Image (tube, rainbow, N blue to C red):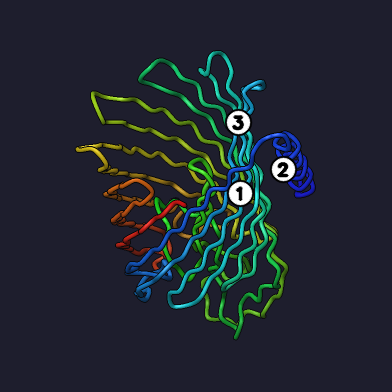
Amino acid sequence: MHYRTYHHFGILLILAILELTTSEAWSLESTLKLHGGYNSNTEARAHGSSSGFGQLDLRFSLPGDLETLATDYEVFLDGSYVKSSDQEYRATAGGALDWSLYADRLRPGAMYAYSIYRGDDDVNTHGATLWADWSLNDRAGLGIEQVFSREDYQDKVTLNAGGEPTYRLGSIHEPALGSWGSAAGVTQNLTSLYDWVSTNFLTSDLRWLTITQHTTEPVTVKRDDHFSSTALRYTQAIGEGLLLDLRLAREHLDSNIDAAIYRRNTIGIGGLWQPAPRWELAPQARWSATHYKIKHPLDNDPDMTKILGVSLTRRQDAHAVSLRVEWLDNDSPFDEECYERTVVECIFAYQF
């Protein structure tokens, strides 16, 4: 998809939602989230520094439904602020439509969002998501999701500054489970289906692959990324209060900087258990293999990422408190990209 396609699709989707809701009573919902925690490796690199962080999320949404068309809709505006080793901001606006077909056994949907991020990098993002969820029976479901986005970096990137080869840039995609303050970016959950997350990965100039001490000339470029993701999801209820979730995904990032280009295959498994009323325990595990266009000259293996996480949530009417822990291990042919990261986070949420 070209970025103009995202733009036109988003405008038409939001205008359609507004047109459909003109005769309905508007009921605005608001959600406030406060995060605090500790990240053992904010740079996501070998020997990266650690830091505490705080994060504030504020979301305004206008949900509703049109019974005659069997359609649910939502218009939303999100804002996030993170204070860690640096400060980061994000604002996101968008809309979504969700249809009910075949006695609610099939639910296709579409969403558009436009996001402005300001931090180490200034990035404007157009994103479109299409999905369909099929209820196999009362206890199992199958879903498919297709994501397209374009990341427009506002500032030019200087590679090989000071004559030293550049081999890392920041982006907003990573095979992570959760969100927290990071020097690479802010996670912004738009829906349960579509996440923007923070990461680091390889970058550009081909001459550094000789692995020599020769001086590399600085290069200044305007970065432009295009991201797509296809995911399949299977959910199964087991017994009372236990839900299992299996997810397979294929991601593709194209860029005008060759070494940022990659293909990633991911398999994930998660669970949701309610041991008591108002309590939820959610363990997760994920394995990813990332194949970069620019490879190590002596080792063709992909980056292998393992992630284990668990969260415990207590809900009480409009309030919720969560404790979340995640451990990530990345194994790469490049020593600097072999690292571990542990994050502990506490979240307070209030809906009003």
- Give the number of the disc on residue 65: 3
The picture quadrant where one finds residue 276 is top left
Of marks 3 and 1, the one in the foreground:
3
2 and 1 marks in contact (CB < 8 Å): no
Q: Residues within 10 Å of mark 2 (few under 14, many from 20)?
A: many
The picture quadrant where one finds residue 21 is top right
Distance CA(mark 2)–CA(mark 1): 10 Å
- Mark earlier in primary sequence (3, 1): 3
Please, what is the three-letter code of the amino acid marked with disc 2?
A: Ile
Q: Residue shown at 35%/64% (left/top)?
A: 339
The picture quadrant where one finds residue 115 is bottom right
From this view, report whether residue 213 is shown above or below residue 335.
Answer: below
- Mark earlier in primary sequence (2, 3): 2
- Give the number of the disc on residue 76: 1
Numbered disc 1: secondary structure: strand
From this view, report whether residue 342 is shown above or below residue 248.
Answer: below
Q: Quadrant of the N terminus?
A: top right
Q: Residue shown at 38%/21% (left/top)?
A: 140
Please, what is the three-letter code of the amino acid marked with disc 1?
A: Phe
Distance CA(mark 2)–CA(mark 3): 15 Å
The residue at the far bottom in this view is 162
Please, what is the three-letter code of the amino acid marked with disc 3?
A: Asp
Residue 310 visible within the image:
no
- Give the number of the disc on residue 14: 2
* Image coordinates for residue 320, horizontal then vertical, percent: 34, 51
Residue 18 visible within the image:
yes
How many badges with numbers are in the image? 3
* Image coordinates for residue 139, horizontal then vertical, percent: 35, 20
